[in-house]
Amino acid sequence: MQSAQKLKVLFITSEIYPLCKTGGLGDVSASLPVALQNLQTDIKILLPGYPSVMQGVKYKRKISEFKELQHFPPTTLLAGKLALSKTESLSVLVIDCPGLYAREGGPYLDAGGYDWPDNALRFGLLSKIGAILSSDASPLKWQPDIAHCNDWQSGLTPAYLHFHSGAKAPTVITIHNLAFQGNFAPGTVIQLGLPASSFNVHGVEYYGNLSFLKAGIYYADHITTVSSNYAKEIQKEPLGFGMQGLLTTRSKQLTGIINGIDIEKWNPETDPHLAKNYSSKKLSNKSFNKAVLQQRMGLDVDDAIPLFGVISRLTYQKGTDLLIQIIPDFVKLPAQLVILGSTHVELEAQLMSLAKEYPQSIAVKIGFDEALSHLIEAGSDCFLMPSRFEPCGLNQMYSQRYGTPPIVHATGGLVDTVVNLTPDTLANGTASGFSFSPITTGNLFSTIQLVVETYRNTKTWQKLQKNAMAKDFSWQASAAAYQEIYRSLIA
């Protein structure tokens, strides 16, 4: 299927910014394809037709129908364009199946926060259409050289292709977070049209259930994950989440490639969401954003008090519970905290209670607010990211770009992207933040104390900020690494 000209890639994903996003996958699904396009790759994005996708994709036209697709409802395939900026757009293929996708709520959860009961069918269809379009069964003239799957939601594509007897594209699956595995009852195997023989340890079976992600890891021609350190971590407990044995046996086909960020969208010199733009050469304007953030969130407006920012899912994985435990000592430093996020109802309630108890020092907004997230990155002095595990992480890269040194637990992609402040790293110009391990409330709080002390040393703090802002987190090198894997698979 290899093109004599451009490399052709079908990028199969369940979310894409700005149409639908629950985490880093949404950002990556927009920015990596753009970076690949810039390297002369012919790429198309395959997406479920959620209401936000149907509304946001422009110039839609019907290009195929699957009226009698065994095991699935009648489905229409649409082609259109997703404009990301005035100069950048992506070619998008949309699976229009109203019975599965035209509903209120999120991509995976209903309005009450519960999994959609038919998620196996919803993302089985995404995987199935991805497999059809990546084989000689495709009704389209455009034939991909590579099918690039992402997380469990498209994990069955390599399995469907494995059992397809005709010509087919090689497959790559990217693990954005191994903790989310897409596990369903064993009967789902037959319901989704997979052969019964696939339900064993050398196939899609995972502790007695069907696992979409295990299927992808087992059958894909190559596996990538979103940082080199995370690629090592998932081959052993505890971060292998039961799949460490399989990943170890496939280690020669496993590559860690750090995510990039959109350096145009996340640029303090041009960011339209900021009260004042700034650069490493004009850091004084950063404090103006801090004052605006303090005022907007109802905190005391005081540049002398270090302001810490959090933008996160409020979960155990992200260390939100550890942060809650140290708040009484934190506010006495003194220090301030702005939190933007949602997910865990109990943790949300605890944070809101603390914000009421310490209104001049703690501010919490539940939900997602893109403009506020940019202002928090710019207006905070330090970004808090005490994740128990973090495959890659994006906010620590945004923070460094905005001169907001992050505190991170030394895990996953946080190790690969944040250089801990020490006398040596400060002297050689590589220090860009603060890291600690093991992850305990004591280590977290002592690192925050170090930040407060360092913040008072203006010369050291500004050097740290400038080091961080000078780092290159663009997608260029990462996209080239993906392209190298694609070419190796079709060589």
Image (tube, rainbow, N blue to C red):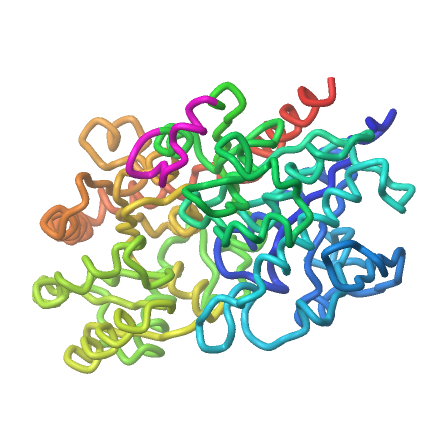
The quadrant in which residue 345 appears is bottom left
The x and y percentages for residue 7 are 78, 31
Q: Which of 317 and 341 is in front in this view?
A: 317
Left or right of residue 2, residue 202 in this image: left
Left or right of residue 414, residue 350 in this image: left
Q: Tell me, yes or no, whether the highlighted magenta stretch contains residue 239.
A: yes
Q: Can residue 487 be seen in this view?
A: yes
Identify whether 102 is placed above or below 10: below
Q: Nearer the viewer, residue 89 or 270?
A: 89
The x and y percentages for residue 284 are 35, 58
Identify whether 356 is placed above or below 72: below
The x and y percentages for residue 86 are 73, 58
* Residue name at image x 36 percent, y 73 percent: 292
Left or right of residue 480, residue 378 in this image: left
* Residue name at image x 52 percent, y 35 percent: 200
Left or right of residue 25, residue 350 in this image: left
Q: Nearer the viewer, residue 220 or 271?
A: 220
Q: Which of 388 and 323 is in front in this view?
A: 388
Range of residues picked out in magenta: 236-249
Identify whether 388 is placed above or below 41: below
Q: Tell me, yes or no, whether the highlighted magenta stretch contains residue 364.
A: no
| Quadrant of image for the N terminus | top right
* Residue name at image x 63 percent, y 59 percent: 121
